Amino acid sequence: MNYIILDMEWNQAQGRTKMVQSPVLLRGEIIQIGAVKTDEKFNFIDKIKISVCPKYYKVMNRHVEKITGITSTQLTFGERFPQAFKRFSAWCGEDFRFITWGFDDIGILSDNLELYGLDHTWGRDYINLQLIYKAQVDGERLQCSLSDAVERLGIPMDAQAHDAMNDAWFTYEVCTKLDMERGLAAYGELSAGVRVALRRDVIKNVAECRKMLDDARVREAVCPSCENILKPREWLYYGGGKKTTIAACPEHGDFLIRLTCCKMTEDNWTVSRTIFTADDEALASYEKKLEKQKNAKKRHQEKESTDDNNCSV
Ligand SMILES: [Zn+2]
């Protein structure tokens, strides 16, 4: 088996209202694929860089242009995604496993594959190198960028970051600095606490973010295994239109549901609902946050009633 160390760059919509919503809520459209192929001992075999011409997000998002340096004109020189994918998957071969820095790339790849009706589970069984790096080098930080890791490991930053080929190469260099044999052996354990999405639904035309749970389509999530409606517990409220809960299927156990609300126009919202398996850690964290939310509510009510008393005096 070979390892394919993958990095991609993607363009974003010019604004939320311009986002492609079907067949997937397209967070990013791939414009560059960069990859390094190695054997099981991480000896270099080959590398590839493919520029992709986007079909939907043809104008560079200002922020993406700033970090990648890619202009809208340059985009037109790329290959169309289906052709780029055909060439890339042929290059990857049959027996390989992806290694990426972070979780984002594979999610974006899966969305782009689905966009073109291709197998969106392709390459799903990947290794997030960040987890191995955090276990062996820098466990303290919650988020750690590739360039932080490159610097910390003393790898010379001799090429521009946020270029798919250069970043894939930097990621490869990070691999060579880590004890990959030990890291890969422990990977199952490292990733156990990390949740993998089992199902994602997009609910469009929701009238109001604050009242999204009034909408049965939002409230009623189905079990990823049997499609029965899950029975949710109390919802936890976060800022920024985010809510989570634990919900149960009598047959398949507990799931973690996460809702994110996105404003499309003044009175039109899209809710993205993701379902994860609820492991012990998720359940414990839910209980803890629920307790906190209840206490905050109680304190708020007490304060209200004190205020009322003050008024009546
Ligand atoms: Zn079920």
Image (cartoon, grey):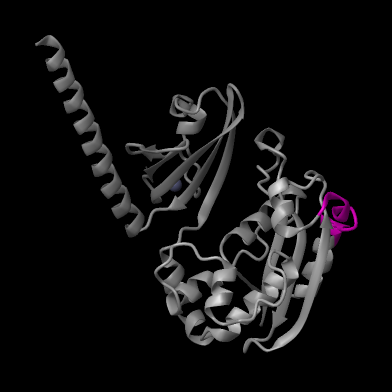
Q: Is residue 167 above or below residue 253?
A: below
The quarter holding residue 269 reads: top right
Q: Is residue 307 left or right of residue 191?
A: left
Q: Nearer the viewer, residue 95 or 302?
A: 302
Q: Nearer the viewer, residue 39 or 76?
A: 76
Q: Is residue 77 magenta?
A: yes
Q: Is residue 203 above or below residue 153?
A: above
- Residue 155 position, x and y percent, is 61, 81
Residue located 33% across and 39% down the image: 233
Q: Quadrant of the C terminus?
A: top left
- Residue 156 position, x and y percent, is 64, 81
Q: Is residue 76 left or right of residue 254?
A: right
- Residue 229 position, x and y percent, is 45, 37
Q: Is residue 125 above or below residue 268?
A: below
Q: Is residue 162 above or below residue 29?
A: below
View extreme (left): residue: 313
The quarter holding residue 290 reads: top left
Q: Nearer the viewer, residue 68 or 214?
A: 68
Find the magenta span and give its range. Answer: 71-83
- Residue 47 position, x and y percent, is 77, 78
Q: Is residue 85 left or right of residue 169?
A: right
